[in-house]
Image: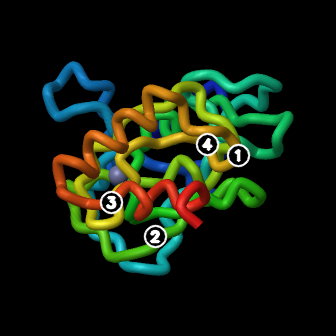
Amino acid sequence: MLIYPDEYGLDPNDGYPQKKDFLVSRQEDGKGAGVYTKKDIKRGEFVARITGNIVPNIAQHTLQITPTTHLYDPYFTGYLLHSCAPNIFLDMTEFEIWALRDIEAGQALTMDYASTEDILFKQFPCLCGTPNCRFWISGRKEEVSPEGIRHIEEQLKALGRDSCEIVTLECM
Ligand SMILES: [Zn+2]
């Protein structure tokens, strides 16, 4: 059984995500929204082929293909969580997901939103807790919002770190 709906008419043998391999949580089950793997995945392995509707605008659940085309996928990729140390990479040319590290059954698949998005639908504070966490996530080509700068400064202050570590341009 594929995760994508039957009306997409996909071939189940083409690598699209299967319900036996992944759980897409939309938050109401208490696990938190996200895409969780049900099987162990090895670093460098192919994870899944992805699809959706190609739309001209950024919205919730879209991923950038080009600056003017976006993949709207409210079934799978639209629920991928962000991490500043992601475990998957999305190839938006081939529409494929690959593992960047070993992922154990039960773990969430995580991507770096800035790896695909020039501009995010909405910037947000990051709670990924990884050593290189950027604390505030924005697209790769947009300015961090004033709210984001305040948030980053607060986080750095709480950690006793200098803001030059993150706001590098202003410090050079
Ligand atoms: Zn983070």
Earlier in the chain: of badge 2 and badge 3, it is: 2
> What residue is shown at x 60% (from left), y 59% (from top)?
169
The quarter of the rendered structure image containing the N terminus is top left
Element on which disc 3 rests: loop
Query: Distance of mark 2 from mark 4, alpha carbons?
Result: 22 Å
Looking at the rendered structure, which numbered label has been put on residue 162?
3
Callout 1 secondary element = loop
User: Are dots 4 and 1 in contact, CB under 8 Å?
Assistant: yes
Per the image, label 4 sits on a secondary structure element best described as loop
Q: Is any part of residue 31 visible from this angle?
A: yes
Tell which residue pokes out farthest to the left in this image. Answer: 30
CA separation in Å, label 4 and label 1: 6 Å
Q: Where is residue 31 in the image (x, y as percent from the top left)?
A: 17, 34
* Tag 2 secondary structure: strand
Residue labelled with disc 2: 99
Neighbourhood count class around disc 4 (C-alpha, 10 Å): few under 14, some 14–19, many 20 upward: some
**Residue 103 image point, x, y percent:** 30, 68
